[in-house]
Amino acid sequence: MKSFLLLFLAIAACAASVLKDPVSGYKDGDRYFYFPGDGDDTLHLVDAEEPVDFEYIERYTRNPDNNGYWLYTSRNPSSAQELKFRDANSVLNSNFDFSKVTVFLAHGWNGHGGNSMNRILIDAFLQNGDVNVIVLDWSKLANRGYTTARSGTAEVGRGLGQFVNWLVQLGFSYERVHLVGFSLGGHLVGNAGRETGSQVQRITALDPAGPLWGWGRDHLAKTDGRYVEVIHTNTGLLGYNDPLGDADFYPNGGSGMPGCWTNACSHSRAYEYMASTVKHNHLHANECATLREATRNNCRGTVYPMGNSDLFKSRSGIFRVNTGRNYPY
């Protein structure tokens, strides 16, 4: 009996060392880690060695109708009109205005088109200006296992890029496109911009996902659009650590956000900061000479606004702004 108890305790200790504390997040090389569902902060245990369902990815991405394109405007701010890829009438008979800026929103893992991340950003952009907002719903793939969703992210992004190209063929302009993506969606919109020949005017990646993105060429890059901005709020854990864009913002150093006690909360702060700056344009960051300066709060360079809705931002570099604990931060 004693030997059995000792064996049980040994197994339990081993499991505790393998399954990370949900608070501690992800480190490179971890097999098991926790990652939050997009928009609800529910933690899910991920096995990094779970086989990727490539058959499902291929089946999903070859049919454009598996993605939803939901249009919101000032005329329909709370009830979406569904646009159909390659169905021109679905666009021409909608409230879509070819003369206006169009903001595309892309959720992340376990997300969907109606989640809190999308709702918060839809409201912010529509309250700020008279724009089109198109939500990409890729929930059928995003709600598979993390390794499968991660492996399908780039292909879904290319599909979004093809949708943008199609709108341009109908009379739209790349100069009026703003792609915004959170977590896995941050890499997704990078691939969408790449599919357009990097012609979209602006890309904003909100704490692009870190786990399992340290390899390959399908992560976000500053060459994916005319201007690429990244807001890092949980670096090295749930979010990507290194600079990826023309401008990389590390609010509060890029890791633990004020008012947050978990990595999931800090991760979600990226889209909350974005929504707040779209409305108020008030978080002005100091430029940093290095990423080390940003993490140590030693930035003394000239200021530049983080986030907001300005389609023609131009400054490049690494920036830090210190925020408050509560909205509007």
Image (cartoon, helix red, strand yellow):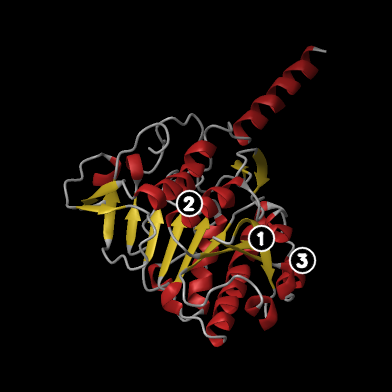
Residue at 63 percent across and 35 percent down: it is: 19
Give the SS element for disc 1. Answer: strand
Which quadrant does the N terminus fall into? top right
Inter-mark Cα distance, 2 to 3: 35 Å
Closer to us: 319 or 15: 319
Residue 126, percent across and down?
Answer: 50, 56
What residue is pinned by disc 2? 124
Q: Compared with residue 137, is residue 319 higher up or lower down, i.e. above or below?
A: above
Q: Earlier in the sequence, mark 1 or mark 3?
A: 3
Residue 171, percent across and down?
Answer: 52, 85
What residue is pinned by disc 1? 80
Inter-mark Cα distance, 1 to 2: 16 Å
Residue density around tag 3, few if under 14, some if 14–19, many if 20 or more, within 10 Å:
few
Residue type indicated by callout 3: Tyr
Which quarter of the figure has residue 133? bottom right
Inter-mark Cα distance, 1 to 3: 27 Å
Residue 199 visible in rendering: no
Closer to us: 182 or 10: 182
Residue at 64 percent across and 38 percent down: it is: 43
Residue 63, percent across and down?
Answer: 74, 75
Residue 321 visible in rendering: yes
Residue at 65 percent across and 56 percent down: it is: 113
Q: Is residue 287 left or right of residue 30?
A: left
Give the SS element for disc 2. Answer: helix
Residue type indicated by callout 1: Ala
Q: Name the mark on residue 56.
A: 3
